[in-house]
Amino acid sequence: MDIVKLTTEHFEEAAKLSMYAFQYELSKEELEKQKKKMEKQHILGIFNEGNLASKLHILPFEVYQQGKYVPMGGIASVSSYPEYRRNGHIRGLMTTALKVMRDKGQLLSYLHPFSIDFYRKFGWEIFSDTRTMTILKGDFSIPESDGKIVRLEKGTYHPDLQRIYETYTQAYSGMLVREQTWWHDRLQSWIPAIYYSADEKPEGYLLYSVKESKMRVAEFMPTSHEARKGLWAFIGQHDSMIEKVEISTSLSEPLPYIMKNPRVQMEVFPYFMARIVDVECYLQQFSWSTEVYTPIRLRVKDPIAPWNDGVFELSGKGVRKIESEAEKVIRLTINQLSALMLGYKTVKELAEVEAIQGNPDELDQLESIIPTQNTYFPDFF
């Protein structure tokens, strides 16, 4: 099976495969824009008798964690024509993609799964949930706030959106570093509304739409409680236009607590998956809560990326992979390590479901050195 990097001459074929697999159409102008975006992507493909049979795209991103920018490879548009499915193409592409991302220094990889179980086989694991609240207008309220809302035209970018977003990301692990081009694409479907405090500081924003008596809020991002009240009041001011609002938020967003009726319809579901691409390099750059005085050894199982499969020693001298199998180790898969290090699960939570094994004292020690982190990922690719 030959896996190659697609060049510009194959971009139209790649777009046609995506359109077939994901059942959408692009106009000629949209196709040209899509091909332009592909120039920044690393696209892997498999050909059969000169025709593109399967492919995936690696998108170059960075994410925020612990106040740092961490390089991330986004896996997207994984697809095959039906006559080539179940021939091991996707396994070959995913395995090669991990090698490519490692060579590029991308320590993490994200993807949006069509099947969680399918991608778990390749080492990816859920790292972020999303919560959607559906609130009827009878439960709206208009709390007082000292600031004001500035509503922009649909698709309009303002630098204060980025300022607020960057502040908001400080409370979470793994959110996307957004470039202005990303904002431009993100805003095409949404109206921005920015909350400014009494002293004119940007402290929160909404991205929303209104259609057929329903408001949809794709991003609800206050960085202060005054902003939270102001944004909620702005939603409430639509009571003559809409019957309900559907709001997507992080699980830790306390908006329901300030509602007059918090007993609203809520849906929580797993959203994005993540994976550590290079365990040794990732752990070396990680900021631990405390000094590691007694060495901790992690036996990581990763059958897809052999450079991650083995024992990693954490000590006051840093992190290193050791060749010999140690007797006293904490055992876990690359899936569980990824969920643990990004903050989606704790050691205690993983131990509860037997997803991590080790001596209780060593598990407690590992728990003590990993800082508490909340995850949230409102983006899509």
Image: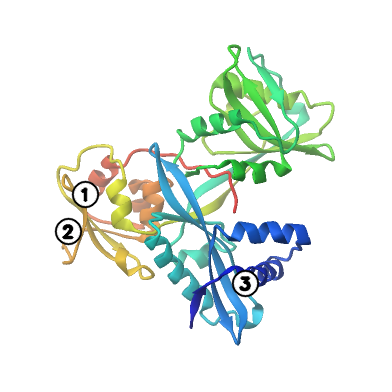
Q: CA distance from mark 3 to mark 2?
A: 53 Å
Q: CA distance from mark 3 to mark 1?
A: 54 Å
- Quick one: label 2, few (<14), some, or many (20+) residues within 10 Å? few
Residue in the picture at 59% in, 28% down = 160
Badge 3 amino acid:
Glu
Reading the image, the residue beneath label 3 is 9
Q: Which mark is residue 263?
A: none
Which of the marked residues, 1 or 2, is nearer the chain's N terminus?
2
Residue in the picture at 23% in, 37% down = 290
Reading the image, the residue beneath label 2 is 328
Dot 2 falls on a residue whose secondary structure is loop
Badge 2 amino acid:
Lys
Badge 1 amino acid:
Glu
Whether tag 1 and tag 2 are in contact, CB under 8 A, the answer is yes
Reading the image, the residue beneath label 1 is 362
Dot 1 falls on a residue whose secondary structure is helix
Q: CA distance from mark 1 to mark 2?
A: 9 Å
Quadrant in the rendering for residue 369? top left
